Structures are given as C-alpha cells and as structure tokens.
C-alpha cells in the first residue's frame, strides 16, 4: 500500500506539474488519491482475485471517508472551543439563567448561564423515565411471564421499536 501511494504520488507529480498546466493543492490531492486507488486495485488484482481487490479498494475509500468526517467534527469542536472558552465567565455559567438574554449584546455570555437548560433537561429526563420505566417493566413481565395471544404481536412491535431511531418515533422533535 505504501509503495502504491509513493508511486502514485510520483506519477501524479510528474503529470500534474511537469506535463500539464494544472496547479493547486486540492486538485493535486484529488488526482493523487484516485491514481492511488487505481494503482492499488491494479496491483492487488494481480496478487489476488479481482473481487478481493475491489473489496480492499472500497475499504480504503470507506476508511478515507470516515477519517474525513471524524477530522471535520474534531476541527469544528476545537474551533468552537477555541473561540468560546475565552469569552465564557465560568463563575456564572451554572448559576445564572437566560432571563433578559439579548443575542445582539456584545458581552452576552457575562450575563447569562445554562441553569434553565440544565433544569429543563432534568425535567424531561425525569418525566420520560417516570412514563417509560413502568411501561417497559410491564411489557417485559407480560412477554416473559404472562404470555397470551398478543405475545407475538407485542414482541414484533418491541423489536421494530428497538430498531427505529428515536427521531422517527417522535417526529415533532426532529422538525
């Protein structure tokens, strides 16, 4: 794999900068990546079956995509943290509420906190647990101990619900 990467880099460098009039780092990286994939598939297909070579190339593509997404998420988190941490007043963050919050105020983070958000989150989680836990226990007892004609239907519904994201179950929260 390393030899394919080095060979494709050399090939793209010669073609990109020496033979053609192309320029730019993004175009170079794109051409290098696709020539690497082609060369990697060609070399791997000569050593193994074509299906295995295609599988290895797709593994590289999926790994590259995952690395790009994870890198972008890390970049966004670090950028927001870098910009926000100096302006947060840590002493009032958990004690003050958002009463009288004006978004256009230049030093808004000095006068507001997240106490409302924390209390609201705890209320929602408490209500959801108070409603959901008794229903879940009753369903489990029914499925394992009581049984009956509706057991197959309840089991199917429970299996289907566990496979769905909660966003699809509560569509009003997703919109």
Image: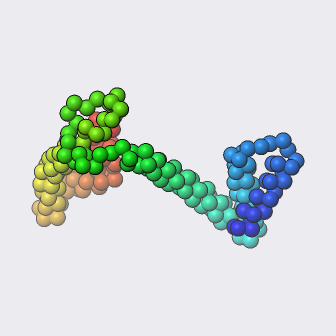
Frontmost residue, 100 versus 55: 100
Q: Is residue 171 above or below residue 34?
A: above
Q: Quadrant of the C terminus?
A: top left
Q: Is residue 89 left or right of residue 32?
A: left
Report the label total.
Answer: 0
- Picture quadrant of residue 37: bottom right
Q: Is residue 55 left or right of residue 103?
A: right
Frontmost residue, 5 versus 75: 75
Which residue shows up at 80% across the image and 42% down it?
A: 22
Q: How is the image coloured?
A: rainbow
Residue 150 shows in this picture = yes
Q: Position of residue 144 (x, y in %)?
A: 17, 64
Q: Position of residue 2 (x, y in %)?
A: 70, 67
Frontmost residue, 147 versus 70: 70
Q: Quadrant of the N terminus?
A: bottom right
Furthest residue toward bottom: 47
Which residue shows up at 64% across the image and 63% down it?
A: 56
Which residue shows up at 12% across the image and 54% down it?
A: 134
Q: Position of residue 113 (x, y in %)?
A: 24, 42
Residue 51 shows in this picture = no
Q: Is residue 130 left or right of residue 51?
A: left
Q: Is residue 146 above or below residue 113?
A: below
Q: Position of residue 17 (x, y in %)?
A: 82, 48
- Picture quadrant of residue 40: bottom right
- Picture quadrant of residue 115: top left
Q: Is residue 133 left or right of residue 43?
A: left
Which residue shows up at 19% across the image and 56% down it?
A: 151
Frontmost residue, 126 versus 86: 86
């Amino acid at each position: 794999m390393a030899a394919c990467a080095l060979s494709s880099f050399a090939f793209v460098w010669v073609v990109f900068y020496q033979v053609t009039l192309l320029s730019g780092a993004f175009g170079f990286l794109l051409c290098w990546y696709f020539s690497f994939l082609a060369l990697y598939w060609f070399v791997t297909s000569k050593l193994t079956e074509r299906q295995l070579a295609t599988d290895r190339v797709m593994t590289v593509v999926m790994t590259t995509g995952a690395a790009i997404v994870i890198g972008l998420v890390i970049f966004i988190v670090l950028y927001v943290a870098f910009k926000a941490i100096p302006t947060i007043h840590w002493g009032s963050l958990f004690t003050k509420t958002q009463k009288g919050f004006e978004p256009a105020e230049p030093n808004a983070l000095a006068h507001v906190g997240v106490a409302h958000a924390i209390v609201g989150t705890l209320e929602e989680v408490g209500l959801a647990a108070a409603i959901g836990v008794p229903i879940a226990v009753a369903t489990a007892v029914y499925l394992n101990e009581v049984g009956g004609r509706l057991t197959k239907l309840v089991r199917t519904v429970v299996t289907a619900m566990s496979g769905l994201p909660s966003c699809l179950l509560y569509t009003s929260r997703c919109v």
